[in-house]
Amino acid sequence: MSTASGQERIVVGIDGSPQSKAALSWAIDEARLRGRGLRVIHVFPALISIASTPTTEYLPQVEKEQAAMFEQALAAAPPMDDLDVERLLIGGNPSEELVNASRGANLLVLGSHGVGSFRGMLLGSVSIHCVQQAHCPVVVVRHPHDDH
């Protein structure tokens, strides 16, 4: 399939959670239905330092662990062989990086991460930020088991 421009891409943020797996599955179906490319993004928080460990020692280990999780999530996803898929692993603020990725995209897809006693009705902070700030329409996909 030919490479899709930014306007023809669906961007989906994943973090390995059941909610993001549901979002990825939904985005794959939507990309196929619309004939769009897919940009799958995992943004992990990039800390400056932890426990007095210099970033130069800490960040490569975190990036390695996050890359393994990212590849594992992609391997468990429905087949995407027929789609133009771009995979991005980014260290930074998830809310801001996903909003940046929405610039020029056709659609931004995220999983819900609601908390509290009304978990099925709430969004997580990243989803709320993206719904309010994204440069394109946003779809927040609930995990099928969030209804309990």
Image (tube, grey):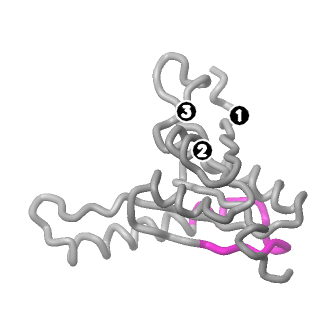
Q: Name the residue under label 3.
A: 123
Q: Residue 67 vs residue 106: left or right?
A: left
Tell me the element at label 3: loop
Where residue 76 appears, as percent x and y from the top left, is 67, 60
Q: Which amino acid does label 2 sit on?
A: Pro
What segment is highlighted magenta in the picture? 72-87
Q: Which label number is shown at residue 144?
A: 1
Q: Name the residue under label 2.
A: 18
Task: From this view, report whether residue 133 is shown above or below residue 63.
Answer: above
In-front residue for pair 13/25? 13
Packing grade of label 2 (10 A; few <14, some 14-19, many >=20) is some
Q: Quadrant of the C terminus?
A: top right
Where residue 42 appears, as percent x and y from the top left, is 52, 62
Q: Are marks 3 and 1 in contact (CB under 8 Å)?
A: no
Q: Which amino acid does label 3 sit on?
A: Leu
Task: From this view, report whether residue 86 is shown above or below residue 30.
Answer: below
In-front residue for pair 119/9? 9
Q: In which quarter of the image is residue 79?
A: bottom right
Within the magenta stretch, is there residue 6?
A: no
Q: Farthest top residue?
A: 117
Task: From this view, report whether residue 114 is shown above or below residue 7.
Answer: above
Q: Which label number is shown at residue 43?
A: none
Q: Distance between the residues labelled 3 and 1?
A: 15 Å
Q: Distance between the residues labelled 2 and 1?
A: 9 Å
Sequence-earlier tag: 3 or 2: 2
Task: From this view, report whether residue 116 is shown above or below residue 53.
Answer: above
At 68% from the left and 40% from the top, the residue drawn is 141
Packing grade of label 3 (10 A; few <14, some 14-19, many >=20) is some
Where residue 70 appears, as percent x and y from the top left, is 53, 65
Q: Farthest left residue?
A: 52
Where residue 98 appears, as percent x and y from the top left, is 53, 57
